[in-house]
Image (spheres, rainbow, N blue to C red):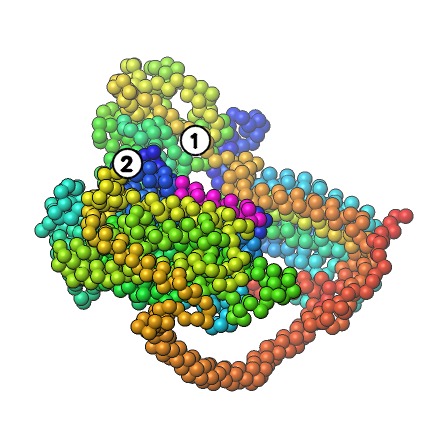
Amino acid sequence: MFLQEYGAGRDPKLKWTNRVICATLHKLNPFTHRMKCMTEVIVFLIVGSIAILSAAFMLVSKNAVHSAVFLVLNFMCVAFFFLTLSAPFIALVQVAVYAGAIMVLFLFVIMLLGAERVVGGASNIYNWLPRAALVLVTIFLITVGWALASGEINTHTPPPAAPQVRVIHAAEAPPVDVYLNNQIFVEGVNFREATDYHSLAAGTYGVTVFPAGADPATESAAILGELVLSNGDVVTMVAVGANGVFQLVRLEDNPLPPGPNQARLTILNALPDVPAIDLVDPGLPSADDTTVLIASAGFAEPVETLLVDAAEARTLAVQQTGSAGDRPLATYRDLPLMEGTNNLLIAAPEQLPSGTRRIAPVHVAQAAQPLFGSPDMVAQALYTDYLLPFEMVSVLLLAAMIGAVVLARHDLVQESRPRRPVVLRPLIGAPTATLTTPTQEPTRPVTTPKSGD
Amino acid sequence: MENFPQLVPLVVFVPLIGLLINLFLGKYLGERGVSIVAVGAAAIAFAVAILLWMALAANGYEAAVIEIRPLANWITIPEAALDIKWQFRVDTLSVTMMLVVAGIGSLIHLYATGYMHGDPLFPRFFVYLNLFLVFMMILVTGNNFLVMFVGWEGVGLCSYLLISFWWDKRQPDRKFGTVGWKNSLAGRKAMIVNRIGDFGLLLAIFLIFWTFGTLDYYKPGEVPILPAHGEAATHGEAEAAHSEGEAGTPAAAEGLPLSATMGVFNQAEMMLQQGAEVHFGPFTLPIGTVITLATLLMLLGVTGKSAQIPLFVWLPDAMAGPTPVSALIHAATMVTAGVYLIVRSNVLFHAAPVSSAVVALVGTFTALVGGFIALGQWDIKRVLAYSTVSQLGFMVAAAGLGAYAAAMFHLVTHAFFKALLFLGSGAVIHAMEHGHHHAHEVAHEYGGHHSDDLPDLPFDPQDMRFMGGLKERMPRTYRAYLIGMLALAGIFPFAGFWSKDEILLDALKVGFLNGRLEGYIAFGLLLVSALFTAFYMGRQVYMIFHGEPRTEAAKYAGERGGGMNVMVNVLIVLAIGSTLIGLINVPTGFWVVDRIVPNHVFTDFLAHTVVYAHAGSANMLLAFIAVFGALAMIYLARILYRRQAVVQGTRDPLEANPQTAGIFTLANARLYWDETYDRYLEQPFNRAAAWLGDRLDWAFLHDFVHDVLIRDAYNALGRVLATPVDLGLIDGAVNGLGRLVRRAGGAVRRLQTGYVRVYALSVLLGALLIVVLLVAPLLQQALGG
Amino acid sequence: MEPTIFVPTDLYLMLSAVLFVMGTLGVLIRRNAIVIFMSVELMLNAGNLAMVALARQWGQVDGQVFVFFVMTVAAAEVAVGLALIVSIFRTRKSINIDDLHNLKG
């Protein structure tokens, strides 16, 4: 099924054989889809049966070594499921840590203790216990099964993702503060600067933009606007304008990664006095129509994004629409278009400190999310949102190691402990003279004779 | 030298350090060390006082107010606008007092090192003496009435401690059982009588604070407003005149209260000029009446501290203290605090003619009564004590007559010669005691040969009837004492002559020139008192020093050994002072002398501070009359007492004469003053107290309210709470709960089987229950929907 | 690009439930302490499977991160648990779980 993610076999990175298979599959799409669906379900059923059977054998094996081996088999099956569930990293960890390290530890202990079989008389006082357990477990299974089968439990719709908003300042103006519903959102955004994404609750916000440091209670806003956010939105607000007339442009961003070795590219015309611009590649022949990558981007109008091949440095230019061959308005020299990034180009008016005005080529690059389930994604989550739990688990692991070492120490184990003096009467109110403990023989810790001797 | 006023805290703190050293280390220092520390502290204070005097002279006698940091904000309550600072005031008046207190004080400290030689409580005595100096300096240096009151109370405390210093003496006493008991009672009497006076002073201070909103005499840098007819229109007066008829002063316009910028005295002057009124809740009084009231209340304080009628009774009893104490506290310094208070408040007294008249009359009668009683006393110190009462009466009368400079002048001269007389009497007593011991030793040596001659009566070294003929045995003491006697009697050219003459002249002026009745009364009675003074002093000198020794003790008395040298040297210094100190204030127009010595220097010195001080000119006729009368009285005493030796058991020549017997008996019985107080004040008071104690406190409050109402009720309540409530209800509930828990625990513990698998099963059961609970609503939904 | 789903998530959840139940039975029925431990591991794996399935279903990586944590904790638990078993075996010479019932009320 991962083949599907790589499109219809157009990916030049794939091996030619895979490319052929993918192209064929793509051509035969409706049929193969059903086929693949069936295949996957069949595979699931087979591997699932193996898992259940191995678990059952583990349960009934008299020999603990056999149990352990069956458990390894079960773990392997689960690892396979992890792989099919787009969790390759977890799958590998499962195999390495569980099936590898932990189960070897089990086997080692079993062998060390020579405890393949339970010795000692089985007490028969709780004979009813397996039966009771079976009954309870059956009730559990029925309940869970019914709950799943009834469809009343929602396992399909994910919880809403909070909308995310960032601000870019591309207007010919000093730094600004942005307020949402009269609450400060970001402050001191410089020209050309892009803020990070901020999570917000879904809803409608009144947006006001003030010059940096202005008091919103007394001064009038430079821009008044409205921002409607629904769940799943990823929005960039760009402040554009010049000569005292400003507005906000809303751009919808795509957080998902582009294909491998690709980058997204789009342009925003932030020049009030230029009706429309083109994004051209001056490296290609000018007569060719393909030099125009994006055509006719009107002032403050969002245009569609383009998927381009990733490049270390690519020179692009901005030209007024209909003036092909003229000197470009602005040129992006050696623009880095990295793999897996969203690139926003803005042609913005800028007044230099010397007073001369020019058109500034603004470039904002943002890495898109990594592939789902990839080690990248897990690592990103671990090192951002789950950093604190991660640290705590590490400390726990360390403590467990120390604890295991301490517990397994030889001299900790004593066959007979010195008995505490038995106090027959309660201590309260007893005269102090009677509290003196009877003199004891100095007790030496008696070490257990080693079983191997 | 301009900065010398900054030294003024030293006059307080040096004696304080001295007393602390002696308090904590006195035991280890020995008599010599203690003496050096104590006398040194007093001497340093005196040196500082001299420096302050020089500083004043260099600064044109301008008053200075000094603050030191930790004490400055003494009592500060910003919310109540109450700000009483502890400031030191250096002006001519306070420096005069400092010089007297520290100067005489140093000499008396020195004397006391000899007098107290061998006393087991030697260090403690000097701790008390230095403490007295501390408080006396606080009294005279304070810049407001409250600081002065602190000193006032402090010296009262020291007076109490020192009067009853020998509270543990076990010698028998006729009236009180032991001398120690007598001493402690004397201290108690001084304390209680002074409380009455201090009550009045405290009320006066409250009244002043209510009226003026401050207690400071003058604020720092403030200049006294001179009387309206004054020549130099000072800044303060210009301000006051400017604000006349307007709502407030410039200071008030700035938003500051008047009390923050003006002291009591200037405010009083200003309010008098404006005819302001003072509001006391529903009452309103004109300022003049308020000042009269305040000064009368102050007078009550003065009568207590300065031993005036009616509160003078404590001072003669205070002679129970060691003689240096009598000299320092009860003659030279502390008792003059009242005079200082009046002179310090001269602005207020000048504004209250009624009070002044009362003051003058009180002083006059005190002078007369004191002088009269002194005529008939046997005890050497008691004579001097009544003499002190009399002389204080002179000072108070002078102050009441407006002669503030004369009052202060008499204060200074009196400090010298009365200290001299007391110390001389101390020397005599000391010598008598030694003679007594010596006589016993001699009697013992010769096998009781002389024992028949010794009188059976208890020997009293202070009784003049046991003395006589000491002139040959103590020649230096005799000469010094003679000078003191002449000075006190007012014989030219000794100190007392100048000051007493000035007071008499001022009284005469008030009578003749101002036509005020109290002037005539004062002049006449003070003249009589002066004659009394000459007589009893003559009587004393002749009884002590002339004739033949009347006892063995007097025979063996002498001025050698046992610390006597120091004492006699101090006497000589004081004798020189008593001779010359009068020359600081020679009046104009006095025969040759006014051309040799600068005239009324002291009055001019004081006038920089005391607004209403005025200098006197001499009246040669009056001076002649006074000196002649005094000499005549001394001669009379010589006739009476030289011929006839008065011994214990025989009668006084005055008593023997039928015409004067009544007078003498009256004087000897001290005008029955104490008996009157005892009968009409103390006994009713005691009876009332006894009734209140017996009936109200013991019978009603204790036996009934406490024992019956409270204790029995509590006992009953306690019994009820203990048995049925606590034992029955509460214990039952607690024990029942315990039993219940134990039974429940016994039942439930079976669940803990110890088998892990059973626990696991119960965990599964719980988990299953949770799952079922989670799924149950879905089931309901599915079935219902 | 969302991953395409061929096998319904419910199937995975059912499989997970069955494995979990078998682990439970192992814990309850077996008396060998080591086998009980293995059963516990089996239960943990069943839970992991459910979490990964739902992560795939919802397109959120959090489930996988949690699986990672569960594995770590399981490793810690095994380390300590096996040390305990070794320790117990030294004193008792037995790993029969029913022999260990001293802590009873």
Chain ID of residue with mark 1? A
- Magenta residues, dominant SS class: helix
Disc 1 marks which amino acid?
A: Gln
Label 2 or label 1, whichever lies nearer to me, is: 2
Using the image as rendered, state which of residue B76 and residue B397 is in the foreground. Answer: B397
Q: Is the N terminus of chain A in the top left, top right, bottom left or bottom right quadrant?
A: top right
Q: Residue at x 52, y 25 (%)?
A: A12
Using the image as rendered, state which of residue A345 and residue B91 is in the foreground. Answer: B91
Residue B434 seen in render: yes
Image vertical order of residue B582 relative to residue A272, above or below: below
**Which residue bears the numbered disc 1?**
A366
Query: Residue A222 appears at what percent x and percent y?
Result: 24, 35
Q: Residue at x 23, y 25 (%)?
A: A273
Query: Residue A231 appears at what percent x and percent y?
Result: 39, 45
Whether residue B116 appears in magenta in the rendering, the answer is no
Residues rendered magenta in the picture: B30-47
Which dot marks residue B59?
Answer: 2
